[in-house]
Image: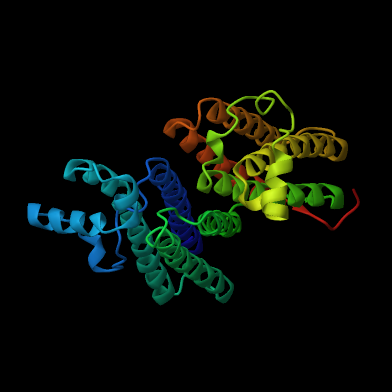
Amino acid sequence: MENTYKNKAILIWLILGCVLVISMVVIGGITRLTQSGLSIVEWKPISGIIPPLSQNEWQQTFQQYKESPEFIHYRMDFTLSDFKEIYFWEYLHRLLGRIIGIIFLVPFLYFWIKGYLDSSLKKKLIIIFFLGLFQGVLGWYMVKSGLVNVPHVSHYRLAAHLITAFGLIAYIFWVILDFIPQKRIKSGNLFIWNLSFLILLFFQICYGAFVAGLKAGKWYNTFPKMGEEWIPSSFSYEFKHYWLWAMLESPPVVQFIHRAFAYIIFILGLIIFFQAYRKLKYIPKTVIFLLILIVAQFNLGVFTLLYAVPISLGVLHQIFAAFLTLSGIYLVKGSTPFGKS
């Protein structure tokens, strides 16, 4: 009875942590889409929790922003009222990061002192802690890239920041599943397809960050073709100019790769669907749910593109990416390479 209580308390705590990290990703997406990420030009991990409270403090903070490249190059017409709007989202993003740290650390120490954690779980939770800490440091490293010379955040650093966030979500959920009974399917083929889906999904999320960082979603707002062509003839210039780096740095090429990954992921979802039926003679609800998520995410991506990345659709697209990650982790955790397929 006591162990059941302990496990339930830890499980609820981990679920809360996972939800909060997903919320952090969502608010980070809003911050990016509202172009608010460079509004706070300092990183004060402790004192930064307190926002400007007086008119004088607001003027001082605004003056710091006025000295930043973003204001000088793009926002010379900004008033204090305009500044407060973009400041809000970046401050909320950082505040939630601090809250997540407290919500993780305090119960973690309590569970440790009370003897609720075995050695294996301690190691996993320490990994979660350092992943979260690294995520915070990486976030500031990303912001710094937009505070010198050219006021644009490096899309490489943006991708690293987003991927580590999704990695943190995935790992927390993996630990959560240790507390939830799950029938494991013994099928080498199915395990490989599930793992392939998850790996490809992370590549797709990475390219989603590239699309965001390069503002590639503003190019070719047509579907299924890119403009009037399936493969734009301008690609010859892009590869001549960027060489193979075009696959990482050319906005239209990056958008094309992001589109291509979407088709491949959809095909992988169908393969998993039919592989599960071939192995089990029925379709598990988790596999059906995965396919529904893939179709929904595909359509969200299309409409996000057609409407040139409005905030609402962009955020929804990111939320469904998180759901797909959780679904992929569940399927990988619930299958094993050992056993006949």
* Foreground pick, 73 / 267: 73
Q: Residue at x 91, y 52 (%)?
A: 340
Disc tally is 0
Residue 184 in sight here: no
| Left or right of 25, for residue 276 | right
Place of residue 67 in the rendered image (x, y in percent of width and height, measured from the top left): 26, 59
Place of residue 69 in the rendered image (x, y in percent of width and height, measured from the top left): 34, 56
Q: Residue at x 47, y 57 (%)?
A: 14
Q: Residue at x 37, y 51 (%)?
A: 37
Colour scheme shown: rainbow
| Relative vertical location of residue 241 with respect to residue 264 in this rendering, above or below | below
* Foreground pick, 322 / 144: 144
| Relative vertical location of residue 49 with respect to residue 281 in this rendering, above or below | below
| Left or right of 331, for residue 175 | left
Place of residue 312 in the rendered image (x, y in percent of width and height, measured from the top left): 43, 31
Q: Quadrant of residue 150?
A: bottom left
